Each structure stands twice: as C-alpha cells, then as structure tokens.
Amino acid sequence: MGLDGRSSGDTWLVSGALGVAGLLALHSAVPNGVGRLGSLLETFLPWLGAAVPVLGCLALLKRSWAGALACLAPTAVWLWMFGGMWFSSAPGPYDLTVVQHNVADDDAHPAGTARALLATRAGLVAVQELTPAARPVYQDVLGASHPHRAVHGTVGLWSAHPLSDVRPVDIRPEGFPEGWQRGLRATVSAPGGGIAVYVVHLPSVRLGTTGLASAARDESAALLGARIDGDPSGRLLVVGDLNGTVQDRGLAPLTSRLHAPRAGFAFSWPAALPVARIDQVLGRGVEVTEVSALEATGSDHRPVLGRVLLR
C-alpha cells in the first residue's frame, strides 16, 4: 500500500510538472476558438512558473525524487522564456525616456497623477482616458517642461521635444461610434533624430462565463498593425494601453511588427496588485531596452516607464 501510494504520488507530481512545462512551451497550441482560452492563458503566462515551487515542495514532503527532478523541466522552460526579464542587468545606454499611463477617467485627483508623471523626468508623457475636464490640469502641470502637445479624443502626448506631422489614427472597430477616438501619431524631433510615436488605447476586454471577450480589441489591433505596416518611418514607437500582454496572440497582428522590451516584467494592471503588463512601449527600428512599473497613482493602472535607444 505504501509503495502504491508513493508511486501514485510520483505519477501526479511528474504529470503536473510536465504539464506546466508543456503549457509554457506550447501555449500557442491551446485553442482560441472557445472563449479565447489561448489568449486568457497567454495573458497570465509568466505566472505558470508559480506552480513550480509548489510542486517542488510537495515532492520534497512526499519524498518523491521523480517529482523533484520533473520540476526541472518547467523551471528550464520558464527561464528560457522569461529569465532575461527576471535577471535583468543594469540599465544600458538610452537616448529617450517615455512614460505611459492610462490615467483613468474617474481619477479624482488628476493634478497629483500629472505631478507623478512629471517627476519621472521622461521626455515623452503618453496618456489615455484623458477627459475634457482633466486636459487643462495636465497642461498646467506638464506645459512648462513639455511645451509640445498632441491630443486627440481621449489620448494625449506631452513632449519636451518638438512635434510635427500630428494626425489622428483611426483604430475604431466596426460598430463603434464616431466619437470613439483613441489613436494619434506624431513625429518627435528627439535628440538622436526623428521618430514616429503612436499613442493608442485599444478596446477593453471582459472575462465572463463564456470566456475572454476580446473581439473588438483584436480587430483594433489588426487595424493598428496594418497602419504601422504602411508607415514609412524607419524609427517608430507604439505607446499605449493595449489591454493585452505581448504574449497574447490576439495582439499578434500588431506585436508581430514590433519589438518588445528585453528586460523588465513591469506589471501594470490592476494597480493595487499588478499581475499583467497591458500598458506597452514597443518599437520598430529602435530598441526599447527596459520597462519598469512605477508607483500607483489615482488610476487602476500603474504608469510604465520605457527607455529607448535610437539605433
């Protein structure tokens, strides 16, 4: 009976460890047709690693050496996928800093949030959910240090460097009202040369009994991806609340055209206990060397600071 019990314990521990390794390595094989389960898994993909120490402790308690050895598989896969972000080195050289923040349209203290963004000393400040009432507040706080501004609908960009060729970007999914304006593009005359900067806010997703509702966000991501694909600029940044992680296949029409930061998890949502980075700083023709999440403001998102090397 004791041997049978130990054998059974070995089996489920080994199966559990190999299952975690398989989900990590083969997450793209999880189907997305029903409830977008694949996207849901990919939203929280790094957190699968939390199962490894749990399985390892159980293996030690049950003296299951097979289970303990099996835990090496998901550990190796996790380190291969996320180790570079976890064990990041000291920040390297960069030419430009940008802070990205969904400032929340119900923030009761927009001046405090604006001052927190100002304190980052970033050359670019990109915001979403900017209300007409809050707009002059942000201008009062940021205007002196960031005299160049572009605002369209609920997205805005304050810059310490001159802006030109400012234009709206239509990423409105089918059926959304014309007043839904969440995208702009501007050319920033940065110290290292000109760079096209997109500030965007993709539609929200909802998790319900039928799974992840992300069709509108995915459609908006595809529209933005096509726009970027046709943009002639050699250096380009996409900054915004994408309502998804870079691993989420629903954003692939956009993220496949851009490079994600090589260091920093920078979980930004929800602000009280962040579990995912859905606020992004992505580049093409430039290198986003690092992103970091900052202290919470009055929003349900945390600001994200990105450092950009202009190649």
Image: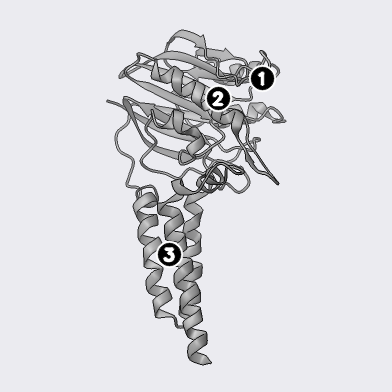
Amino acid identity at mark 2? Ser
Residue with the most extreme left position: 311
Q: Is residue 116 above or below residue 139?
A: below
Distance, label 1 to label 2, CA atoms, is: 11 Å
Label 2 environment density (alpha carbons within 10 Å; few <14, some 14–19, many ≥20): many
Asked if one can make out residue 254 in the rendered structure from this viewpoint, the answer is yes
- Residue 250 location, x and y as percent? 51, 35
Residue at 46% in and 55% down:
23
Residue pointed to by mark 1: 176
Amino acid identity at mark 3? Leu
Of 179 and 5, nearer the camera is 5
Q: How many marks?
A: 3
Circles 1 and 2: CB distance less than 8 Å?
no
Residue pointed to by mark 3: 18
Label 3 environment density (alpha carbons within 10 Å; few <14, some 14–19, many ≥20): some
- Residue 195 location, x and y as percent? 37, 17
- Residue 212 location, x and y as percent? 62, 41
Circles 3 and 1: CB distance less than 8 Å?
no
Q: Is residue 291 left or right of residue 171?
A: left
Distance, label 3 to label 2, CA atoms, is: 36 Å
Q: Is residue 104 above or below residue 56?
A: above
Residue at 36% in and 40% down:
262
Q: Which mark is residue 131?
A: none
Distance, label 3 to label 1, CA atoms, is: 44 Å
Q: Is residue 263 left or right of residue 293?
A: left
Residue at 57% in and 14% down:
151
Residue pointed to by mark 2: 220
Q: Quick one: quadrant of the C terminus?
A: top left
